[in-house]
Amino acid sequence: MSTALLEATEHQGRARIALTAALESGPSHAYLFRGPRGAGKRAAARALAAEILADGAADPEDARRRALLDPSPHPDLVWLVPRGAQHLVDEVRERVIRAAAYRPFEGDKRVFVVEAAEAMRDESQNALLKTLEEPPAYVHLILLSSEPEALLETIASRCQPVDFAPLPAQVLEAALAGSGAEAEVAAAARLAGGDLERARLLLSPRGRELRGEAERCLAAALADEVGSAPWKQLLDEAEGAGTDVEEETRAALEEEAKSGLKRTAREIGEEAKRAGRRRRTEILDLGLELCAAWLRDLAALASGAEEVVFNRDRLDLLRAQSAGIDAARARSGAELVQQVRRSLDLNVSEELALEALFFRLERLFA
């Protein structure tokens, strides 16, 4: 196994075993790398692609070196990333399905990597199905997904799964060293649930503000002060994040349109809005998850289990709030938050759901 693949799977034992076996016996025509964001799927896919392209190349080392670059100049490595909330149907058709019919420009293989494969619309997935069922001998596809349940069963069943587990908190701490105070880095590593990208977000200005808003919401519930509607700040944070991503996506798509990629103003606007809505949903969900984690920490302290607290940088405040709190009530509060997170998938009114949640929490701790 190459050094790059060893490094990419350093903390992913199951993935390392699966990919070692694949290289020894000959790689499959299609893989589904599944696991949380930030678990190393992207790096492992690039390393696997480099090994596949090096095999049979006139100069294996040079082919491997070019494939490992990001972005890669290797003509037989196609890497697809969604521009907004979803992959464009035409882009999947042109860059993967139709391109797969052409023989390699050099060497014996072509590799197509689709990041966030769950962001392909059903139309794209159905179109890709024939390529998965009857791929040319020289084609290898690698799909990456943090939400594999969103893929059509017909797609998933035709790929060899490679599982990536959440990274241990200690690994995240090492990767985040220097990004903040030691206690804050430790907290972000635990609150991220093994997702390095989420941990980095929590250490960004937006992530720090989001943590603060979640804490203020819980403090209001504990102090019988939810009449001030503290949850509105969580909604504002999510709205701001969505607006930023919408503007960034629109600018990127307009730049691409100038360079020759055909796209109407309406298509650009719709795609940018989808990206903004997706980001807004992600941030709101993270805010609620932070609320649940805070209540979990209160339950841990009330039970005398300070060593398992996630918010390591807020211990003094948590100790003060946990005084006199019943651990069972704190755990019940965390479950109420999780119920609301699940309900938001059903398109209920977010503001009404959050208002009801925090008034219920206020009554729970009254």
Image: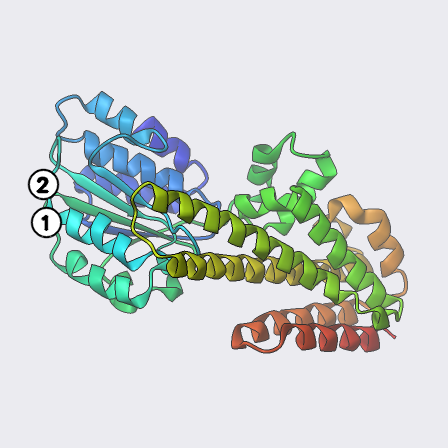
Residue name at image x 79 percent, y 63 percent? 218
Residue, disc 1: 136
Q: Label 1 is placed on what type of residue?
A: Pro
Could you say which is closer to the camera, residue 111 or residue 249?
249
State the image coordinates of residue 366 (x, y, percent, origin top left). 88, 75
Mark 1 or 2: in front is 2
Does any portion of residue 355 appear in the rendered image?
yes
Residue name at image x 47 percent, y 61 percent? 274
Res 103 label: 2
- Side (left or right) of 330 relative to 114: right
Does any portion of residue 1 appear in the rendered image?
no
Residue 243 figure quarter: bottom right
- Side (left or right) of 182 relative to 70: right
- Side (left or right) of 32 relative to 138: right
Q: Quadrant of the N terminus?
A: top left
Residue name at image x 73 percent, y 39 percent? 183
Tag 1–tag 2 contact (CB < 8 Å): yes
Could you say which is closer to the camera, residue 260 or residue 162?
260
- Side (left or right) of 146 relative to 23: right
State the image coordinates of residue 181 (x, y, percent, origin top left). 73, 34
Res 226 label: none
